[in-house]
Amino acid sequence: MKRLLLVWISALAFVSGLFGKDTKPLVVGMELAYPPFEMANTAGQPEGVSPDLAAALGQFLQRKTEILNLPFDGLIPSLKTGKIDLIISSLTATEERAKSIDFSIPYLSTGLCLLAGKNTPVQTARDCDQLGRTIAVKQGTTGHLASRQFTKAKVLVLDRETACVLEVVQGRADAFIYDQMSVLKHFQQNPDTTRALLEPFQTEQWAIGIRKGNTDLRNQVNAFLKSFKEQGGFDTLGTRWLAPQKEAFRAAGLPFLF
């Protein structure tokens, strides 16, 4: 009887695992054009904070992870049509986006700030909305959304981050609205022509994008994020990919992202 009971328990565990666990690959969408969060190495393979986070999530769920490189403004449409299962791509959780997709709990806090031209008078976001000013934004980003409040400035909407930076570097735009980490990076790359105004004028939180109504996956993702944080996973990611930025934030007296 004892042997039969053990066999029955083993069989039940097998069947439960077979039907309870999703064995399909977890397809994660991201734009590999935002180092050090999302980028491709010299072999063309994804690397950075978000690919590492996606890999850890796959291990937690015991599912193979596949990363699909997509343009940023194509991520939400791809999620809604089922081309991808999740978005992990430095995605800000906004009320507007929440109308069409669901979000996990936040895992990172940041803010919009300004990469300003070296010789422009811009010091704050309020200074941007003046006649004769040109402000660059990347299409589909929260910086693009924030620029809609401008009624006097010319808003230059471009599809690439590097193109926005170039407008500031070459003096054709007074400022570029983007997140703190990127603004710091671009200032460090162009210290003779730009200024990093890192104090955020709008705070944001990044989260993982999930298809509307996929409650089971959302609960699993939230459980992972809580566990990953408790076990120091975000500290490890910060040390691996963002050590210079952490030091720069500390020196500027600003709280770090994670």
Image (tube, rainbow, N blue to C red):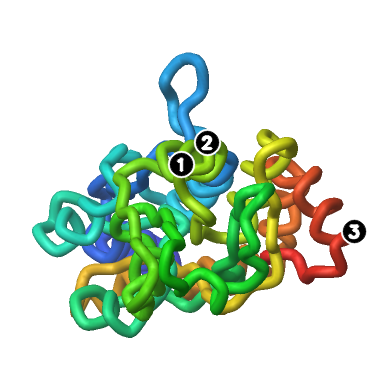
Tell me the element at label 3.
Answer: helix
Q: Earlier in the sequence, mark 1 or mark 3?
A: 1
Q: Quadrant of the N terminus?
A: bottom left
Residue 151 visible (yes or no) = yes
**Residue 64, image x and y in percent?**
36, 42
Rounded to the nearest angstrom, the CA distance separating label 1 from label 3 is 28 Å
**Residue 129, image x and y in percent?**
45, 74
Q: Earlier in the sequence, mark 3 or mark 2?
A: 2
What's the residue at 67%, 68% (across, down)? Answer: 123
Query: Which residue lies under the disc numbered 2?
Result: 170
Image vertical order of residue 192 relative to residue 103, above or below: above
- Circle 3 crowding by C-alpha within 10 Å: few under 14, some 14–19, many from 20: few
Query: Which residue lies under the disc numbered 3?
Result: 251
Image vertical order of residue 187 relative to residue 44, above or below: below
Tell me the element at label 1.
Answer: helix
What's the residue at 51%, 67% (across, down)? Answer: 224
Seen in the image, is 140 located left or right of residue 170? left
Of the numbered discs in the image, which one, if any, rests on residue 167?
Answer: 1
In which image quadrant can residue 14 be found? bottom left
